[in-house]
């Protein structure tokens, strides 16, 4: 493909951002190329690639750059040269830092870099520290305190204030050298580092913020953000108190690097550095006693760009400058905050995930009213109609409540009429006619449901979301009020069952306990069968087939199965297997509605990458799909088990000798043994809640890992 055509395609991808300048940072760990575009005050990263060369790995032992590391670095630089030519970028600044500075063969390496066509500049320790500090000043206008830039070969300290920085200090505390300070205990290592800080004049308290610059600091912040449930993914600007930093350091110092490697968004290399870096963090907090610790994604490279700006541009706020250019490109006035909020929310596609919209709202610090109007209300408008139809369809097929209350002319539903025709009159033709009427009613509701969405999965690249807009006292009180009303509606009947049932629980006879065992077996069988059907249907296009449970009520399906089985076998002998099958089919729509949006979200997010990696169906299912379906699978299993446990539909129609617990409870009520029936109801409630909790909890355990 000609380079001009490739450039045109890239410029389309960059949405108006033109590649203008590039920086190559030759560090102790990596050699990195970053291409910038956009506003000079708020540069946009258009390309960022690194080569893990580890140039500084032998500095402390041999004092030289390893031949293998040099070859890797030069290979990466040759590739960067081709990329820069392809992008037509001539404004390129190449800088080398601690590893090249401290190595005896550093000048030879720089000569080889010049042979590639670059003009590298070797920064002194003071220049490196000052440039990183200037990057922090550019990121946080008016920042005052101390900058600690942690690289592979060194740790640079610089005091900043009034837009200026003092002479920096470079210490041999880079991530590649921290192992030299490792003692038998972290406390001994911390004391050794503290002595070095005292010796270099950093033993007193700074009583100001400590700005942390460097990839390993950012990895540590990512870990802390995940533990805290922080709503954003970018660690830039993330803050820790001194107490939180010490606690974080203690936790990571004792952590196993192998376990840290399993965490999302923390690379294998950074994970191996975190325990030693955590001890360094504790030493810094102990010696410097900072007011707070602030993570800065801006450092050396951004400092190089900031130094080029004129004083007027340097005085601008980077966020406002970036937003001004963003608005100018779209012909909109940036001062209208409501328009800015609208652009940001609309940046998510209409089918975007709810949690991502909430995350964007958090970045704008929108008040609760705006969050409800811009995010929650549109989500509810898509979800509420479908939820209403689901409830309507369930009410149409309701049978157990009417049967338990005794029916009667004013409480006879179609379902109850089917039961009466079947059990008392044994008029199978009339029962079949009523079943057809019921089928048409519920099928109509199910067809309406099929055309209505029930909402998309709340996905965010496996990240849990904390609703910070709900932290306000007024919102918490409002939430508590609604939750209290819902709890009263549910708990008052349950409390009545508990009060009436507890006295008779110890006196339940063997038939009740046998019925409980039968119900457990039926519930577990229904759960296994439902999941076995739901998962392949969710992965395919089987939503219509899954609506069978809403289109056909349990009693209608039971009537049909009775008519089919009767010519070949005794239907009452197959009552329990038929009940398990029907319960699985009844729970199938709910399992599909829990699984299918998640399957679609996972496929959309990870499918292209899996396809690019050549991942087969088996690897995709067991390595990608199923681990991320743990939560909806657990919920679906718990819901199916609870629904099956309390079913009084098909089993009442067949009425076998081996009754389930709901049927046994109904028989106790028919015999006016209300205390025993209440005790059986309490047992049924405990078993249903227990099954749901076990399955749902099992699905939630480590689901965000």
Image: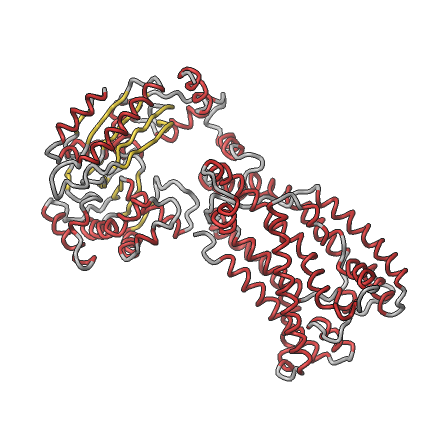
Above or below residue 401? Residue 605 is above
Q: Residue furthest front?
A: 568
In this rendering, position of residue 218 left or right of residue 289: right
Q: How many marks?
A: 0
- Residue 25 visible, this angle: yes
Residue 596 screen position, x and y as percent: 60, 47
Q: Residue at x 19, y 39 (%)?
A: 56
Q: Residue 123 occupies which quadrant of the picture? A: top left
Above or below residue 315? Residue 574 is below
Residue 330 screen position, x and y as percent: 49, 22
Foreground residue among 329 and 6: 6
In this rendering, position of residue 222 left or right of residue 436: left
Q: Quadrant of the N terminus?
A: top left
Q: Residue at x 30, y 39 (%)?
A: 296
Foreground residue among 317 and 181: 181
Above or below residue 686? Residue 255 is above
Foreground residue among 131 and 697: 697
Q: Residue 634 occupies which quadrant of the picture? A: bottom right
Above or below residue 615? Residue 513 is below
Residue 295 screen position, x and y as percent: 31, 42
In this rendering, position of residue 201 left or right of residue 461: left
């Amino acid at each position: 493909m000609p380079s001009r055509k490739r450039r045109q395609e890239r410029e389309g991808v960059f949405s108006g951002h033109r590649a203008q300048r590039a920086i190559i940072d030759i560090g102790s760990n990596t050699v990195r190329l970053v291409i910038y575009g956009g506003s000079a005050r708020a540069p946009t990263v258009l390309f960022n690639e690194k080569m893990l060369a580890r140039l500084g790995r032998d500095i402390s032992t041999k004092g030289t750059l390893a031949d293998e590391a040099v070859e890797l670095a030069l290979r990466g630089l040759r590739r960067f040269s081709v990329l820069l030519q392809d992008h037509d970028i001539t404004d390129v600044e190449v800088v080398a830092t601690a590893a090249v500075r401290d190595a005896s063969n550093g000048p030879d390496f720089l000569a080889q870099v010049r042979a590639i066509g670059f003009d590298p500049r070797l920064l002194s320790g003071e220049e490196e520290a000052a440039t990183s500090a200037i990057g922090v000043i550019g990121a946080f206008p008016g920042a005052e305190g101390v900058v600690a830039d942690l690289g592979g070969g060194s740790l640079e300290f610089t005091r900043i204030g009034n837009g200026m920085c003092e002479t920096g200090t470079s210490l041999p505390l880079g991530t590649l050298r921290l192992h030299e300070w490792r003692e038998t205990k972290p406390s001994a290592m911390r004391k050794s580092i503290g002595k070095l800080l005292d010796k270099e004049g950093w033993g007193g308290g700074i009583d100001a913020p400590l700005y942390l610059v460097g990839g390993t600091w950012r990895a540590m912040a990512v870990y802390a953000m995940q533990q805290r449930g922080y709503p954003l993914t970018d660690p830039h600007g993330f803050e820790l108190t001194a107490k939180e930093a010490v606690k974080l350091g203690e936790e990571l110092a004792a952590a196993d690097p192998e376990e840290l490697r399993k965490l999302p968004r923390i690379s294998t290399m950074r994970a191996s550095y975190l325990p030693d870096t955590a001890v360094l963090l504790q030493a810094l907090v102990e010696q410097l006693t900072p007011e707070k610790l602030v993570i800065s994604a801006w450092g050396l490279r951004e400092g190089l760009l900031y130094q080029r700006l004129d004083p007027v541009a340097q005085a601008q706020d980077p966020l406002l400058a970036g937003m001004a250019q963003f608005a100018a490109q779209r012909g909109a006035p940036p001062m209208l905050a409501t328009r800015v909020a609208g652009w940001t929310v609309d940046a998510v596609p209409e089918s975007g995930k709810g949690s991502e919209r909430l995350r964007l709202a958090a970045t704008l610090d929108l008040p609760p009213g705006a969050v409800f109007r811009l995010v929650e209300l549109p989500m509810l408008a898509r979800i509420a109609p479908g939820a209403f139809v689901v409830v309507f369809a369930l009410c149409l097929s309701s049978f157990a409540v009417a049967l338990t209350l005794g029916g009667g002319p004013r409480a006879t539903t179609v379902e109850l009429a089917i039961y009466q025709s079947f059990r008392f009159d044994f008029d199978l033709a009339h029962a079949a006619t009523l079943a057809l009427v019921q089928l048409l009613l519920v099928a109509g509701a199910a067809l309406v449901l099929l055309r209505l969405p029930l909402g998309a999965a709340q996905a965010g690249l496996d990240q849990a979301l904390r609703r910070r807009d709900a932290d306000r006292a007024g919102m918490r009180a409002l939430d508590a009020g609604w939750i209290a009303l819902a709890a009263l509606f549910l708990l008052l009947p349950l409390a009545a069952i508990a009060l009436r049932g507890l006295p008779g629980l110890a006196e339940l006879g063997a038939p009740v306990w046998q019925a409980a065992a039968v119900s457990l077996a039926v519930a577990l069988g229904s759960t296994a069968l439902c999941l076995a059907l739901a998962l392949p249907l969710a992965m395919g296009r089987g939503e219509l087939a899954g609506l069978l449970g809403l289109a056909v009520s349990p009693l209608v399906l039971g009537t049909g199965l009775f008519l089919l089985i009767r010519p070949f076998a005794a239907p009452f002998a197959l009552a329990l297997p038929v009940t398990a099958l029907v319960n699985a089919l009844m729970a199938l729509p709910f399992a599909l509605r829990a699984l299918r949006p998640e399957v679609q979200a996972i496929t959309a997010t990870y499918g292209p990458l899996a396809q690019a990696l050549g991942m087969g169906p088996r690897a995709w299912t067991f390595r990608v799909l199923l681990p991320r379906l743990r939560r909806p699978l657990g919920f679906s299993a718990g819901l199916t088990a609870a629904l099956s446990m309390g079913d009084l539909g098909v089993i009442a129609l067949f009425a076998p000798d081996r009754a389930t617990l709901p049927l046994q409870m109904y028989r106790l009520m028919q015999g006016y043994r209300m205390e025993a029936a209440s005790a059986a109801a309490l047992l049924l409630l405990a078993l249903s809640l227990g099954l749901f909790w076990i399955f749902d909890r099992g699905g939630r355990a480590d689901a965000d890992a």
